[in-house]
Image: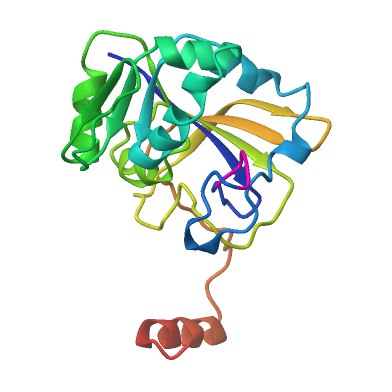
């Protein structure tokens, strides 16, 4: 079965919109496009290793449109050459043709379509951009590895891979790296259900019981 990795550039407040440039994605009046470039350095090794590895791309339609309008025209870049050659699987409800070489449409339910794709023969899969894919795929436990590259910046608004619909679960840290510019690169794998506990060592006080009663009643 193919493995699926999501690699995300995000701010400290979990915004991932338009990291690459001003004109990349200004929807909803996003004003900070290109926020990654000033913090990018030569020591982004874990991501460089990932992006130059062996995989096929899994993309949402908007990220596909951004890539298809840029990378085929930048074949002198090793990433452009690679993206041209590999398969691009695109989750879309649009009937627009996918004209970039080696592009394939996936339609229907996101989780179902990706689950089916993972069962086919072929290279492992990598998500780039494509914020809308994450909530259903995280909830369905279809992302095998999540690389979060968190940049030391607050953006205040914008698209995120989290929208509040994700199912609860734990993640295991399997790798981490910090660049000289303070970019924290952490890689996680799913690790099961959420476990809960308490630091409480004594019987709750009368005041605590009253607080809990207010909380239960909705008046706290």
Q: Residue furthest front?
A: 73
Q: Nearer the viewer, residue 180 or 95?
A: 95
Q: Nearer the viewer, residue 25 or 46?
A: 25
Q: Residue furthest bottom?
A: 219
Considering the whole magenta stretch, tell me its main secondary structure. Answer: loop
Instruction: State whether residue 35 is above or below residue 220.
Output: above
Instruction: State whether residue 134 is above or below residue 126.
Output: below
Q: Is residue 175 left or right of residue 91?
A: right
Image coords of residue 138 (percent x, y): 36, 40
Q: Is residue 20 magenta?
A: yes
Instruction: State whether residue 94 is above or below residue 68.
Output: below
Image coords of residue 206 (percent x, y): 53, 86
Q: Indicate the quadrant where residue 193 lies.
A: top left
Image coords of residue 198 (percent x, y): 53, 58
Quadrant where the N terminus is found in the figure: top left
What colour scheme was applied to this rendering of the protein?
rainbow
Q: Is residue 121 left or right of residue 143?
A: left
Image coords of residue 148 (percent x, y): 57, 36
Residue 138, can we see it? no
Q: Indicate the quadrant where residue 216 lies.
A: bottom left
Q: Is residue 211 left or right of residue 168?
A: right
Q: Nearer the viewer, residue 143 or 73?
A: 73
Q: Residue furthest left?
A: 108
Q: Is residue 159 left or right of residue 101?
A: right
Per the rendered image, the range of residues in magenta is 18-22
Q: Residue at x 18, y 41 (%)?
A: 109
Q: Nearer the viewer, residue 90 or 7?
A: 90
Residue 170, can we see it? yes
Q: Is residue 208 magenta?
A: no
Labels in figure, total? 0
């Amino acid at each position: 079965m193919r493995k699926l990795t999501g690699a995300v550039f995000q701010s400290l407040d979990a915004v991932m919109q338009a990291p690459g440039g001003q004109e990349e994605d200004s929807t909803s009046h996003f004003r900070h496009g290109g926020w990654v470039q000033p913090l990018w350095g030569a020591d982004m090794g874990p991501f460089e290793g990932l992006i130059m590895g062996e995989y096929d791309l899994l993309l949402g339609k908007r990220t596909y449109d951004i890539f298809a309008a840029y990378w085929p025209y930048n074949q002198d870049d090793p990433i452009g050459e690679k993206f041209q050659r590999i398969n691009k699987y695109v989750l879309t409800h649009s009937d627009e043709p996918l004209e970039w070489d080696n592009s394939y449409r996936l339609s229907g339910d996101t989780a179902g379509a990706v689950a089916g794709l993972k069962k086919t023969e072929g290279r492992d899969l990598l998500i780039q951009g494509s914020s809308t894919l994450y909530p259903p795929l995280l909830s369905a436990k279809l992302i095998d590895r999540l690389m979060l590259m968190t940049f030391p910046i607050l953006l205040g608004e914008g698209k995120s891979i989290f929208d509040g619909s994700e199912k609860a679960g734990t993640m295991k840290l399997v790798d981490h790296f910090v660049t000289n510019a303070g970019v924290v690169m952490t890689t996680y794998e799913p690790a099961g259900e959420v476990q809960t506990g308490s630091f409480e060592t004594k019987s709750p006080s009368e005041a605590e019981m009253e607080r809990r009663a207010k909380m239960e009643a909705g008046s706290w």
